[in-house]
Image (cartoon, rainbow, N blue to C red):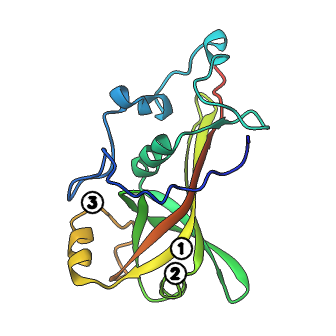
Amino acid sequence: MPGRKTPVSRDLSPLPMRAAAGQRLIQDPIASGAARHSPGYLRPMSAEREMSRYPTDHAGLEILPFDVCLQLLAAVPVGRVSFLADGEIIVLPVNHVVDGQDPVFRTARGSKLSAAEGQDLVAFEADGYDERTKSGWSVLVNGRAHAVYDEAEIQRLSRLSLHPWVTTVDRPFWIRIRPSSISGRQTPGHL
């Protein structure tokens, strides 16, 4: 049904685009079709745009396939994690990488770590917008946050290319979001 989120399959077989240690999860943007979503991409003319390769929802937004959602998540360094803390919804920006299909990020002690230690429900969102073409995309991950305490896993995650934007605070804890659903939308561009 248009507009409904499709739950992520629990068949977590390795994805063909799994990132190697120290690399971000990105395929060649031209070969994979991800160039279509990059800021410098020129959108098709109106006649071509009418033949969108993705279905649209009730608002006319294109519904992005699962693999494109993962590629877009991996293509941007900052997303937002949201969770419930002390009866309030908290939304915080975080630097992240995608490990398989899981967004992962580092944090210090505080509300994000507490949510992960409780395996709380969280949402994670990342997006992109091109001012020139007036086009954009958004990917939403719903799932449970998990604190990573296994030393071998911490060592492996530490080799991924995660570059914090705030370096004055030590962020020793890794958080993994295990998705229950991943959905994405894209606005058609206006030339």
Q: At which x and y percent is residue 72? A: 46, 45
Residue under circle 1?
Answer: 144
Q: CA distance from mark 2 to mark 3?
A: 21 Å
Q: In this rendering, which labeled residue sits more in front, label 1 or label 2?
A: 1
Image: 151 above or below 92: below
Residue type (three-letter) at the residue carrying disc 3: Ser
Labels 2 & 3 near each other (Cβ < 8 A)? no
Identify the element where label 1 is drawn. strand
Residue pointed to by mark 3: 161
Q: Any mark on residue 79, and which?
A: none
Secondary structure found at label 2: helix
User: Taking 37 as reference, is 20 above or below it?
Assistant: below
**Residue 188 % position (x, y):** 65, 29
Considering depth in this image, is 118 or 172 the residue closer to the camera?
Answer: 118
Q: Residue at x 53, y 40 (%)?
A: 65
The answer to whether 137 appears left or right of 68 in the picture is right
> x%, y% of residue 1?
74, 42
Residue found at the far right of this picture: 58
Determine the CA span between mark 1 and mark 2: 12 Å
SS for dot 3: loop
Q: Amino acid at mark 2?
A: Lys
Q: Amino acid at mark 1?
A: Arg
Q: Residues within 10 Å of mark 3 (few under 14, many from 20)?
A: some
Label 2 packing within 10 angstroms: few (<14), some (14-19), many (20+): many
- Residue located at (51% from left, 81% from top): 112
Q: Are marks 1 and 2 in contact (CB under 8 Å)?
A: no
For the point 42% across and 44% down, the residue is 71
Q: Which residue is mark 2?
A: 112
